[in-house]
Image (spheres, rainbow, N blue to C red):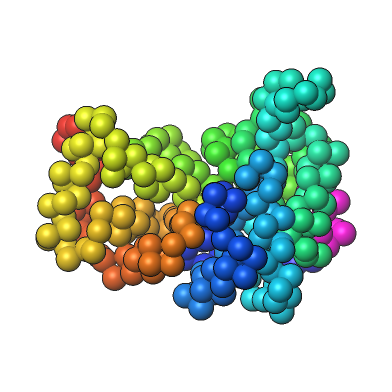
Amino acid sequence: MSNTSLIMSDFAAGFWRLADWGLDRQARLTLIEQYLELGVVTMDHADIYGNYGCERLFGEALALAPGLRNKLQLVSKCGIKPALAGDSSRHVNHYDTSKAHIIASAERSLQLLGTDWLDLLLIHRPDPLMDADEMAEAFVQLRDSGKVRHFGVSNFTPAQFELLQSRLAFPLQTNQVELSPLMMHTLSDGTLDLCQQRRIRPMAWSCLGGGTLFSGDSPKAGRLRVELQRLMQETGARDMAQLIYAWVRMHPSRPIPIIGSGNIERIRSALASTAIQLDRQQWFSIWQAAMGHKVP
């Protein structure tokens, strides 16, 4: 298998809350088709989403139109093992990045999604007990078997990313990280700098702060709403969410925002944010509102 990079769409469809949207099988398929019609081909999952149920719901919908599989990219994540009530072997939340668990999790995702391969498999969270050599062995085995074509990480520090990369003969494709005006640590801790250095595009989760930007009562959220309302008038943005997506995408590492919505109008609005071009002062005015002070 080649070492070529995976070319993802400029936005990804996030299915973390798929089980909460109340969509029947046909409506789930319609949502997938709508995403594809809008040019969003990267579909983001994780084994634990929906209490291990979201991949199955997606796979059931995809089975109605199996020809769509070659038109989309399936991303999944593994490594988090929540405690399970009544299961003495799972009595505490923990991470498991052992070779056996990575392979078993990937194979379960394949079964639930109804596919023969994943386009991208990510380690969901950095594991203090991570054995980089063992993890690399799992990646190589999955890659050689054709079950997973590309690999990456999620929420890794630059040092953790480089440790794992040092054990692999092929490049990690992304680091999926939280990025929003409410959570800006990756702008300054080297995470996005490393993405630029290695010319990989980070995936950005929770760009809207899980809705906290719009309804939170913290001083930071309040300052941001005031500034975003002002910028809506200045830029012609339809809503505050469009400004946030434009703000995230302006970073030179070219983040790929994950849209976590099943509402097609919100999805269309998010994608329309590409028409908004913030200048540096507008970008930094959002940064300033988030920080509560001017740049030094």
Q: Quadrant of residue 189?
A: top left
What residue is at 78 percent from the left and 65 percent from the top? Answer: 115
For the residue pair 68 and 265, the one nearer the viewer reads as 265
- Front-lying residue, 75 or 198: 75
Q: Residue shown at 12%/60% (left/top)?
A: 233
Quarter of the picture containing the C terminus is top left
Q: Where is residue 131 in the image (x, y as percent from the top left)?
A: 76, 31
Q: Where is residue 197 in the image (x, y as percent from the top left)?
A: 50, 51
Q: Mostly what secondary structure, the magenta segment?
A: helix
Q: Is residue 258 above or below residue 41?
A: above
Can residue 284 be seen here? The reply is no
Residue appearing at x 57%, y 68% in the figure: 27
Left or right of 22 on screen, residue 107:
right
Q: Which residue is drawn at 70% across and 76% down?
A: 65
Can residue 43 be seen at all in this image of the molecule?
yes
Numbered-mark total? 0
Q: Is residue 220 above or below residue 113?
A: above
| Residue 20 left/right relative to 178 | right
- Name the spot of residue 32 as percent of width and height, x first: 57, 69
- In the image, 44 versus 280, the foreground residue is 44
Residue stretch rendered in magenta on the structure: 138-147
Q: In the figure, residue 185 lies in which quadrant?
A: top left
Percent position of residue 14, x then y:
53, 55
Q: Does the magenta stretch include residue 8?
A: no
Q: In which quarter of the image is the N terminus?
A: bottom right
Q: Based on the picture, tell me whether residue 146 belongs to the magenta stretch.
A: yes
